[in-house]
Amino acid sequence: MKKATMKDIARMANVSVATVSYVLNNVKNQTIPDATRQSILAIAKELNYVPNLAARSLVVQRTGMVGILINKSPWLPYWKRQSYLSLTDSLESKLTSAGYHTLVISLDPLNPAMDVIRERKLDAVFVLDVMDEMFYRISANFVDGVPLILIGSLINDRMFNQVNYNYPQALETAISAAAAPSCLIMENHNNTALAGWIMDSTGLAREDIYIAAGEDQGQKELEAFLLRNRGKHIIVINEFLAKAVERTGLAASVTAVCTCGFPEIVQPDTQIIRFQNDRARTAFELMVTLKSAPDDPAIAAGNQFLVDIFP
């Protein structure tokens, strides 16, 4: 007989895996209706659910501290800083509500100093926008059994669980809905594999794609790109960057792929594509599953977890 998992209980109770974990692990500081709690316990009993012993030991012996490691340079443009801030704020809020203490550390993407966290016993680690060649250098500092979740990064290694926006879905939607030929403006990423995945998914020529790296000299380059593409539909990833495009007055039509959670900042005539969450919820629920049910079939099926757009 197939062993029951938290995902099975969540499906039958019509709740999230995180909610099931909170109830079964008796996590404090969670406002869960008693009826929902009793339903989850009854279903777990009905299915003869047996918790993973290794995961249970992590819950019992946990330090209550989770790390968020952000690979960022000091000269980031405001749209990139806002992208980091929005994700970190949302993730920290979810961790705090679950009773965790959050350690947020900015790392030099070219030379991450790991001494500051090496001696801390973290229950889980989220790593944002890591350079391709730094994955193993960073992961070597954490013991087996500690969930390590990458956000805004791609690596072809099943050892790493990765949470990303479904950029191909968003870009296909934007391009197919445009009345004119499209070009793309996107923010810079430390992770070249992610940047390549985004660009390749558009089907556009490289000359139709602009990567916005800065604010000063970059503003002149941005305007030059827009002038070269007069008459085209401009798709912009990151609504704060889309706002910078709007201010130039050089784009006839714009679609903003909103990655920061602030679609209201763009002009009313700008088309908007929104994702179903800000990646923080997906990453948080993945952490809960990895800690409490690491043998869950959803984990075994793959290590790439994508956040889809709203239909």
Image (cartoon, rainbow, N blue to C red):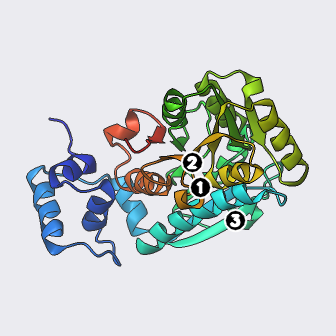
Q: Is residue 302 left or right of residue 119?
A: left
Q: Is residue 263 left or right of residue 196?
A: left
Whole-percent x and y of residue 164? 54, 43
Whole-percent x and y of residue 104? 64, 67
Judge depth for marks 3 and 1 and give the one in front: 1
Mark 3 lies on residue: 105
Q: Which mark is residue 9?
A: none
Q: Is residue 205 left or right of residue 68?
A: right
Determine the residue positioned at 69% across, 31% down: 231
Judge depth for marks 3 and 2 and give the one in front: 2
Determine the residue positioned at 39% across, 35% down: 300
Dot 1 alpha-carbon crowd within 10 angstroms: few under 14, some 14 to 19, many 20 or more = some
Determine the residue positioned at 64% across, 57% down: 83
Q: Amino acid at mark 3?
A: Ile
Mark 2 lies on residue: 270
**Cα gap from disc 3 to disc 1, whole angstroms:** 34 Å
**Which of the marked residues, 3 or 1, is nearer the chain's N terminus?**
3
Dot 2 alpha-carbon crowd within 10 angstroms: few under 14, some 14 to 19, many 20 or more = some
Mark 1 lies on residue: 267
Residue closer to the observer: 9 or 306:
306
Q: Amino acid at mark 1?
A: Gln
Are dots 1 and 2 in contact, CB under 8 Å? yes
Q: Is residue 282 above or below residue 36?
A: above
